[in-house]
Amino acid sequence: MRCDGSIRVDPSTRHETLNVMTQEFPYQADLCDLHDFPGNQFPWHWHRAVEIFYIRSGRLVYHLPHGEVCFEAGQGGFLNSNVLHMTTCRESDACEQEEQQFLPEFIGGFETSRIMEKYVQPVLHAPGLTLVKFDPAHAAHTPMLDAICRAYRLYEQQPDGFELELQQTLLSFWQGLYQLTRGQCPPERANPDDQRIKQMLRYIAAHYAEHLRLEDIAAAAYLSPRACGRCFQSQLGTTPFAYLLDYRVQRACEQLAMTDLPVGEVALQCGFSSSSYFGRVFFEKTGKTPNAYRQEKKQR
């Protein structure tokens, strides 16, 4: 598969939407290039599935609430379940990422199985274990990168019985991850802002087309407007209204690419007060006019 540039994030929950993952086969893979997305970024979101990835070319940055990690070509990583994150790349960088996501039960079985309780849950709930970087310069990381790449190739080529071999490969990866991270994560207190920011992002996703006040966004997490601003700044490094504006543009990009609605109607449905204001903001964010963006997507 290949990412098509549409924002695959459930607008009501900010969970990433995995359009080919099913209960019968809770795994999916994509070849992603962030240049296909507005602003060369995949917006803030989270998902219950864990994520493994390999950087085929270029340079990719994972942004987390308390820092960022840069990945170069040949490196890879593991992103834990329900971790709030955003990915970006520079306009000048070619960037292709082989991304795979799977639900923990794909390798651990049912919730109370011995494998799930002894080996999977300790990693999922390890304090401070959010993002792990694998570098080929470290000998211990080579088997991890090999497993990530092998799993992707299996799904890409889908030989007879690939489902069994894929599951075995991911089990091998998990065994290595468990050994590498066992006892390495320092104790970390739960941060209440993690849930607060998710509550406010859900609220924005549900009400972005309306006239929103700072008080409305703050109330979604039972915060004062001032505390709301501090939470956005500490978690996402931005303000509530800057995030809201970016989110509206992202939704507008989706509408322009996937529908034939007039630009003025797209503007209104995405919370912009006028077509002229929408056009100005859209150009500032994407470097294109709404019509030019739509035409480019249709040509592709």
Image: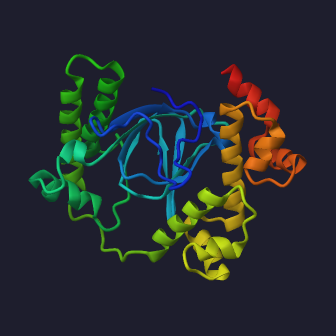
Q: Position of residue 241 (x, y in %)?
A: 72, 64
Q: How many marks?
A: 0
- Say which quadrant the C terminus sits in: top right
Q: Nearer the viewer, residue 85 or 54?
A: 85
Residue 68 vs 38, above or below: the answer is: below
Q: Nearer the viewer, residue 23 or 289?
A: 23
Say which quarter of the image contains residue 200.
bottom right
Q: Nearer the viewer, residue 212 or 128?
A: 212
Say which quarter of the image contains residue 183.
bottom left
Q: Nearer the viewer, residue 184 or 247?
A: 247
Say which quarter of the image contains residue 205.
bottom right
Q: Is residue 134 visible?
A: no
Q: 52 left or right of 159? A: right
Residue 289 vs 184, above or below: the answer is: above
Q: 85 left or right of 181? A: right
The colour scheme used to paint the residues is rainbow
Q: Position of residue 294 (x, y in %)?
A: 74, 30
